[in-house]
Image (cartoon, rainbow, N blue to C red):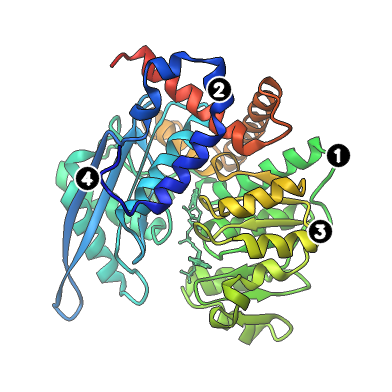
Amino acid sequence: KSNCKSETIFFQALKEVLETIQPLLEKHPEYLHQNIIDRIMVPNRAIHFKIEWMDDDNIIHVNNGYRIQFNNALGPYKGGVRFHPSVNPDILKFLAFEQIFKNAITGLHIGGAKGGADFDPKGKSDKEIMKFCQAFMSAFYNSIGADIDILGGDIGVGAREVGYLFGQYKQLTNSYDSIITSKPLALGGSLGRTEATGYGLIYFTQTFLEDMGETLKGKICTISGSGNVAIHAIEKLYEIGAIPVTCSDSKGAIHDSNGIDLELLKKIKLERRASLEYYALERKKATYVKRESYTEGRSFVWSIPCFAAFPCATQNELGEGSAKLLIENDVKIVAEGANMPTTPEAIALFEENNILFGPAKAANAGGVAVSVLEMSQNSSLNYLSFEKVDQRLQDIMSNIYSDLKQTCDEYKLDMDLVSAANILGFQRVADAMIMQGV
Ligand code: NDP
């Protein structure tokens, strides 16, 4: 049905959904009669726009901007915005497609979308970032709205960028509508949103493990990435008594066998926006391996023996070779903080070897769930304490786990949470589509 032959990542995401929902289709032939598969795999709307902006030397640049409004059967479109040079329509289509099911699994009323630009924020001045964000918003602000499509953060889009995007929307429309989440607190952001994806990932993993008679307490954990998700996963791991020993960025990876120095990591990645190379310079006992030195392209992170592995950087970062290493080193659980970080071959190996696996659609849904809490706080003007948000997040992650477990029981899936997440998400969206007619 697609008119683009190079949609390899989108097809990877689509294939996984189609392969795993067979038991649902057998039980509910109405989804086939209603042609839901064809209807769900084509985005409602895909917007491609030009972004022109001027740098500090008065040179004009042009970037591509996108918003994929994939499905709004369950509620207004909702999904983050990514600024990274690798951004293209294929990557955003896969992210928006995954977002539909993730959002459905939370049980909240939101549809799925994703957007972004092939802009590289690295090395840009604060003024250049502001100008780019303003140009990005100006190019498509009339396609979004608090009840239509709500943006959020993702790779390269944190509180600073969200603030500038929001400011420009306000400037253009004269409204303070909640068209973006992950806002700074002073602009109506929610306490606990910054931490939500990383914390939610660890809450989900703990719930899963406890149900299997295990715990993360006292266990060695490996994490990839060193951005919003990775840093807050590491923070929560420390809070529950686990030992996170790795992190990585686009240039290399750190192994700190006594445990990652979280304060130093935050200083380097959040304040200085610098490379992890500086972490190793300040922590002499830590090992730093440059990306160029990875064996056969496998991240150094996955060669470190661990009980639990948390890929929190980017898509397809954990492949077959890394999965084999983790299995040889007796990993017990892998839970995805990033979106689709594990390749299909690696997932198959984990399944064959009975490694517990928490798929992103469920495990990293805490971020979007708290974004909905931010939206509801904005409209009610009733702001929640950090403790209340955190409690809601724990409840949501635990409900997601129970719903997946129930789906596993219903379809005899033997704790295959990948299939359960796809079945549950698909069913909720499909039912809403049928109710709304063609
Ligand atoms: P950030 O931009 O805060 O951080 C991304 C991190 O990953 C950076 O440390 C970056 O390195 C690193 N990275 C990027 N590419 C690679 C690579 N190829 N190898 C190793 N490290 C890499 O993004 P987030 O933490 O917000 O997002 C991470 C993942 O989590 C993404 O898949 C995102 O879609 C997903 N996600 C995020 C949510 C959120 O609430 N933020 C919600 C749900 C999912 P460097 O510093 O060098 O750029």
Q: What is the distance, in whole Å, between disc 2 and disc 1 at their CAs? A: 29 Å
Q: Residues within 10 Å of mark 3 (few under 14, many from 20)?
A: some
In the image, is 437 to the left or to the right of 271? left
Foreground residue, 290 or 258?
A: 290
- Residue indicated by mark 2: 24
- Find residue 330 and name its label: 3
Q: Residues within 10 Å of mark 2 (few under 14, many from 20)?
A: some
- Residue indicated by mark 4: 47
x and y percent of residue 331 in the render? 77, 57
Where is the N terminus found, in terms of image quarters?
top left
Foreground residue, 312 or 390?
A: 312
In primary-sequence order, the first of circles 2 and 1 is 2
Instruction: Mark 2 and mark 1 in contact? Answer it, CB < 8 Å.
Output: no
Question: Of the residues shown, which amino acid type is indicated by label 1?
Answer: Gly
SS state under label 1: loop
In primary-sequence order, the first of circles 3 and 4 is 4
- Residue indicated by mark 1: 213
SS state under label 3: loop
Q: Residue 2 sits in which quadrant?
A: top left
Residue at (38, 53) in percent of width and height: 91
Up-down relation of residue 21 to residue 35 (above or below): below
Residue at (55, 27) in percent of width and height: 22
SS state under label 2: helix
In primary-sequence order, the first of circles 4 and 2 is 2
Residue at (30, 29) in percent of width and height: 147
Q: Nearer the viewer, mark 2 or mark 3?
A: 2
x and y percent of residue 301 in the render? 66, 69
In the image, is 232 to the left or to the right of 259? left
Where is the C terminus found, in terms of image quarters?
top left
